[in-house]
Amino acid sequence: MYPFEIVKPMKEELTSLGFKDLTTAKEVNKNISSSQTAVLIVNSVCGCAAANARPGVIQSLINDKIPLQLLTVFAGVDKEATDAARVLMVPFPPSSPCIALFKNGELVHMLERHHIE
C-alpha cells in the first residue's frame, strides 16, 4: 500500500475533473450497476499511468459523447474497490492501469496495460 501523500495528486488529477473515487466494493458495484454508461480507470503509480492512462482518459472527455459515470479506483491503495472492479472485468486478467467501459452494468470495452503502454 502506498502512502496517501504519494497518491493524493495522482487521484486528484482525475477527481478534479469529475471522476468519482471509489474505495469500497459496495461503491464499485453500486455505481457500475446503476449507470447506463460508465468509464472506470484503474489508476496506478506507474509511469504508464502518469504518461498515458490518466492523460488519455482525460483527453477522451473532450467529446460530444461521454459516459454518464466517470469512476476510478487506485491499485495498490484501495484494494477492496480494485478487487471488486477486477471481478467485473473478467475475462480480462488484472491489469493496472487499465480503462474499462460499461453499459448497463456490463463490460463492453477494455484497454489493458499493454494497450496503454
Image (spheres, grey):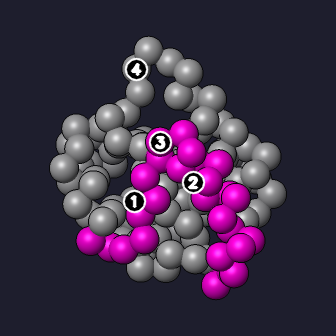
To which residue does mark 3 refer?
A: 18
Assess disc 3: are there few (<14), some (14-19) or many (≥20) residues with their C-alpha within 10 Å of its C-alpha: few
Q: What's the CA distance linking mark 4 and mark 3?
A: 15 Å
Label 3: state its secondary structure. loop
Which of marks 2 and 4 precedes in the sequence?
4
Amino acid on which the number 1 mark rests in the picture: Met
To which residue does mark 4 refer?
A: 65
To which residue does mark 1 refer?
A: 89
Q: Position of residue 58 (x, y in %)?
A: 60, 35
Q: Are marks 2 and 1 in contact (CB under 8 Å)?
A: yes
Label 2: state its secondary structure. strand
Q: What's the CA distance linking mark 1 and mark 4?
A: 22 Å
To which residue does mark 2 refer?
A: 98
At a point 35% along the width and 42% down the height, the residue shown is 69
At a point 56% along the width and 45% down the height, the residue shown is 16
Q: Nearer the viewer, residue 22 or 113?
A: 22
Residues in magenta, as a range: 1-26
Label 4: state its secondary structure. loop
